[in-house]
Amino acid sequence: MKDLKKLGIVVFFTLLVYIGVEPYAHSVMHKHVEGHNFKYPDLKPIAAKGNPETGKALAAACMGCHSIKSQGVPAPMDPVSASGAYGVNPPDLSLIGALLDEKYLAHFLKDPVHTAIVAHKFKDRAYPMPPMATDDQSAADLVAYFKSIAPKEVKPKEAYEFACGRCHEMRYAKWTQIGEVPKTKKNIQTGADLAKLKFNEKLAEYKGNMVKYLGKLPPDLSIIVRARSEEFLETFVEDPQSQLPGTGMPRVGLSKEGYEKVFAYLEEVGDPSKPKREKVGPIVLLYMVVFAFLAYLWYKHQWKDLH
Amino acid sequence: MAHFDPNARPFSHKWMNERLAVDTLQKVLSTEYWIPKNINFLWAMGMILAATFGILLISGIFLLMYYIPDTKQAFDSVNYTVMSEVGYGWLWRHMHGVAASVVFLIIYIHMFTGIYYGSYKKGREMIWLSGMLLFVTFSAEAFSGYMLPWGQMSYWAGMVITNLFSLGSLDFQGLVEWIRGDYVPGQAFLNRFFMLHVLLMPLIIMALIVLHFGTLRIPHVNNQDGEEIDFDAEAQKWKAGLRKESKVIPFNPVFLSKDVFVMSIYFIIYFYLVFYHFEFAMDPVNFDPANPLKTPPHIYPEWYFLWSYEILRPFPKDPGLVAFGFAQVIFFLLPFLDRSPNVAPASRRKPFRCWFWILLVDMIVLTIMGKVPPVGVYTTIGTVAAWVFILLWVTLPIVTKLEKPVRRSK
């Protein structure tokens, strides 16, 4: 019993230190940002009912810059030239209806700069994406079209590539801003891998254009799930300015489900041991509990006639 | 002249005994190494520390097989190679990281147990001093290890801590550069901290662990009442079969059985942390690669250094360094600053009892204040706590002088 009281004191002070330096200190260091569950309450609901057929006709204007690969529309330029022209490679629009919030997308088509919250970065230059819808009706039509071509199921990796992958590298998944690192072979005589060198040259050029456009190179997201809390990531993606005022990162406008897909991929790459931990953990703990039980029997046996 | 039986079979008991005195060794080190019976679970912390050091050593050896001490590759060798490509690399890393944090918790429990029961006095001074040397070398080991993943916190903690060696207004930049091998932390810095972490410090630690065990031998382990035991007489009783009457028990198997039980409980908690709650031991900031162009908004050491960091922080530069230096050495002087002849638990030593609990709470306050940003009320609390720490140690000789002799309870 006396031992238990002492254990209680040790546990009490240990927890006090833990709560002080972990949850408490972090709550002081990191400001709390209230998330809105990807509902974008600052944007007014769009009442107009969209017609996908009208939208399809309107979408022809998009194809000057964007590809829609699922509909057989190729990209007008390769990623590096596109980054030279616009700063970053414009996204493929195949998944846009599946991953972005409807209301956000409609507003974005009408007023891209303010909907993406990037006005502070485009005071004296034009945002490469011009307004594509003049009124609620045409915005709703475009949204309806993109929804109509959206696939039912989007893989987490695809969600990442669409939403993050044109600015953020993910080297642990061999992903670069201009696509996957190609499998190449070096010349066994010279030791040089020309194809790889060429790819790296293109990548460097793309990054150079992007730095000119954004001011800095966006971070690699390989292990961002370990470097930032879940809460931070969620509220940051929902509204980057809420966590990092002045950042060049646009509000991407993901829907809740879209974000969950992206996050699933970040976690898959950044914390690959999670499924193994969940499998091995219980076995090790069970082993230790059995060990403790046997140790207890031994202890009781050794100490039974000592007092 | 020793006698060697020519007929003894090689490696038989007799053969070994003649050459290595295995029977004597076994007696001296285990079956007739006497430990007081009057102890509680806190007496198992030493063995828990030894076991945790073992975990750190073994997991460290596995990590060493894949770690690359190169400023360009170190981060990915830890975060990608070990975590994704090496089978169970994540397990070794999380075991290493969690053990590195938990080992300090146990060290502090072990230290405060020693302070509470007066286990540093009357012949036990060398136990305390060798233990403090272990604390210092473990700190150096932890700090050098923290540099290795070459993340943001590695880099900037390395910057801040090596800067301390400019010794404030003395401005010994040359010394700082000599330690870093460069103007800023770089390849030379990483290489030398790598060497310290995987070779020099572990060697010193292992030597000190042997010394620490050795220092226990003559004064023997203390007990819950600080009672002076005649170990020879009590050992005779035990050997005569008076298990109940004897005040001592042999290390093996009796003391060991309790140690192993306590250790098994510890391991349940430890492995729970390894699998389900390892984040506390691995700061998120260190998962951003080192970037000399971007200072993190908050730079703080791992939790076990926070109390001494907070003694540095609230003061101006030079007095801060003096206070920091004071905090680093003052624990060494404990056996000499405590002027009371009593070896007894703090609960029976009147003014010292208060001193003990104030010290404990003060160090926890310092620890928490060391992590939160030094603004507003936190600065005030931190400054007060730092002064309390200094005053506690200044007044310790007086506090212990005032103490009356403790009457032994039966």
Image (spheres, rainbow, N blue to C red):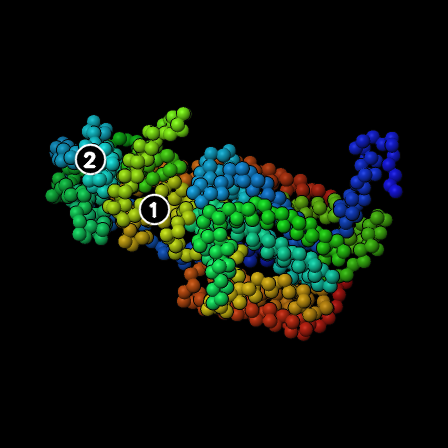
Label 2: chain letter: A
The mark closer to the camera, 1 or 2, is 2
**Marker disc for residue A131:** none
**Marker disc for residue A234:** 1
Crowding at dot 1, Cα within 10 Å, few <14 / some 14-19 / many 20+, comes out as many
> Helix or strand or loop: what does disc 1 sit on?
helix
Q: Quadrant of the N terminus of chain B?
A: top right
Residue B309: image location, x then y, percent: 50, 61
Residue at 68% x, 47% y is B259
Crowding at dot 2, Cα within 10 Å, few <14 / some 14-19 / many 20+, comes out as many
B259 above or below B163?
above
Residue A76: image location, x then y, percent: 19, 32
Residue at 62% x, 38% y is A290
| Residue type at the position of mark 2 | His
Residue identified by numbered label 2: A66
Label 1: chain letter: A
Name the one closer to the observer, A250 or A230. Answer: A250
User: Residue A299 sits in which quadrant?
Assistant: top right
Name the one closer to the observer, B84 or A85. Answer: A85
The answer to whether residue B271 is visible is: no
